[in-house]
Amino acid sequence: MPAERALEDRAWATHPWVLEGTRGVRFGVMPLGLPDWSAARDFARRVEAMGFDAIWLPDHPLVGYDAWTMLAGFAEATSTLRLGTLVSCVAYRHPVVLARSAADVDRISGGRAILGLGTGDMPWEFGQMGLAYPPPRERAVVLEETLRIIRPLLAGRTVDYEGTYLRVKNAELRPLPVQTSGLPIVVAGGGQKTTLRLVAKYADACNVGAASWAGGAFTADAVTQKFEVLRRHCADACRPYESVLRTGLFGFALAETTAAAREKLDALGSGARNFMENVILAATPDEALSQIRRAIMLGFQYLIFTARVSDPESLDLLQARVLPVLKGKDPN
């Protein structure tokens, strides 16, 4: 069955994972600096015990562990935590191989996988892997071709597709994921003419953050504009705007005082701080609460917090002093 027909068959049914958001804002964690496996496993179990929705892993083969291998391990180590990539670069794996990995993690976990996709944000990593780093428009074409192949594959369709960069011939994915609605797909980035259009056409969720590589959502006005553009793209696709989950990437170096929080942020080093741009902020719990409330007011429905594994205090303060207030519970 052609990919086009497979996409039409879904008729923009809202994914059950998106519908879970009707109970309120949800929160996930993206660990930074995962150590050896035993410590990484313990961290995932801690995140699950804290009540977070999901653990998200970046996908950079030359920076850390393979994301899908780690998620498969987390699938065995946890029982309720959802497992996602933020994000898998479509240039690093053929869509059939990526679909296979995602489906396997979904089966191992009993239906908890989330597939996050993006065009790639580290030119030097492309170079080290011997890959060209094309301009944004060309990378967006590869992303769209990947989506046209991978979504119907994960839904159990036979896909016969030939694009500019990618092609498959009568491809079928067996065995399939456990999730009968297909894996929820997140497309990251905030490009208004390309990325957000692809979100509206193919994805279950968007993701933006306050960094150039995360969609450039640096200000309240920028966030508002991006969500309005997404709304228009959804209308063009004859799709309900609320069927797309609006997720954001945030981070806090938390401490009881602003000065102590600033010391934590400075300890990251200039290279990491420059790369993360404005994603990670130094804050007290009260200051973080104010920032998160503002994000929710702007329309974010799901917040993914970066968490340095070497800084357990920040995650503890977030879980004990910030999130209970947002959920209407007294942290004391």
Image (tube, helix red, strand yellow):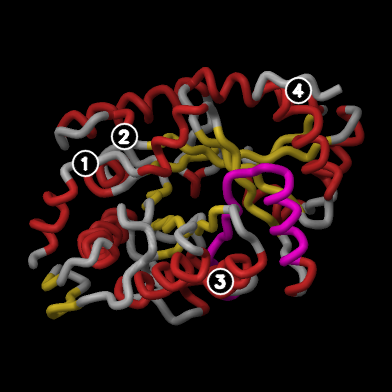
Q: Which residue is mark 2?
A: 243
Q: How far apart are labels 3 and 2 at the CA level?
A: 28 Å
User: Comparing marks 4 and 3, which lies closer to the viewer?
Assistant: 3
Instruction: Specify few, some or many for label 1: CA neighbours under 10 Å numbering under 14, 14-19, or 20 or more.
Output: some
Query: According to the image, label 3 marks what residue?
Result: 72
Q: Nearer the viewer, mark 2 or mark 4?
A: 2
Q: Nearer the viewer, mark 4 or mark 1?
A: 1
Query: Which residue is the site of mark 1?
Result: 12
**How far across and how far down the image is residue 35, in percent?**
77, 69
Say whether marks 4 and 1 touch (CB < 8 Å): no
Foreground residue, 92 or 148? Answer: 148
Q: Residue at x 31, y 57 (%)?
A: 180
Q: Which element type, helix, strand or loop, lies under badge 3?
A: helix
Q: Which quarter of the rendering shows the N terminus?
A: bottom left
Q: How crowded is the residue under tag 4: few (<14 C-alpha within 10 Å), some, or many (20+)? A: some
Residue plotted at (82% across, 35% down): 317
Say whether disc 2 or disc 1 marks the residue closer to the N-terminus.
1
Q: CA distance from mark 3 to mark 1?
A: 29 Å
Identity, as a three-letter code, of the amino acid under mark 4: Glu
User: Between disc 3 and disc 2, whose residue precedes?
Assistant: 3
Q: Are marks 3 and 2 in contact (CB under 8 Å)?
A: no
Q: Amino acid at mark 2?
A: Ser
Disc with the residue nearer the chain's start (2 vs 4): 2
**Residue type at mark 3?**
Ala
Q: Amino acid at mark 1?
A: Trp
Q: Residue 291's spot in the image, x, y percent?
A: 66, 24
Q: Which residue is mark 4?
A: 287
Return the disc, 4 or 3, that comes first in the chain's sequence: 3
Q: Are marks 2 and 1 in contact (CB under 8 Å)?
A: yes
Q: Are marks 3 and 1 in contact (CB under 8 Å)?
A: no
Q: Secondary structure at mark 1?
A: loop
172 and 286: which is toward the camera = 172
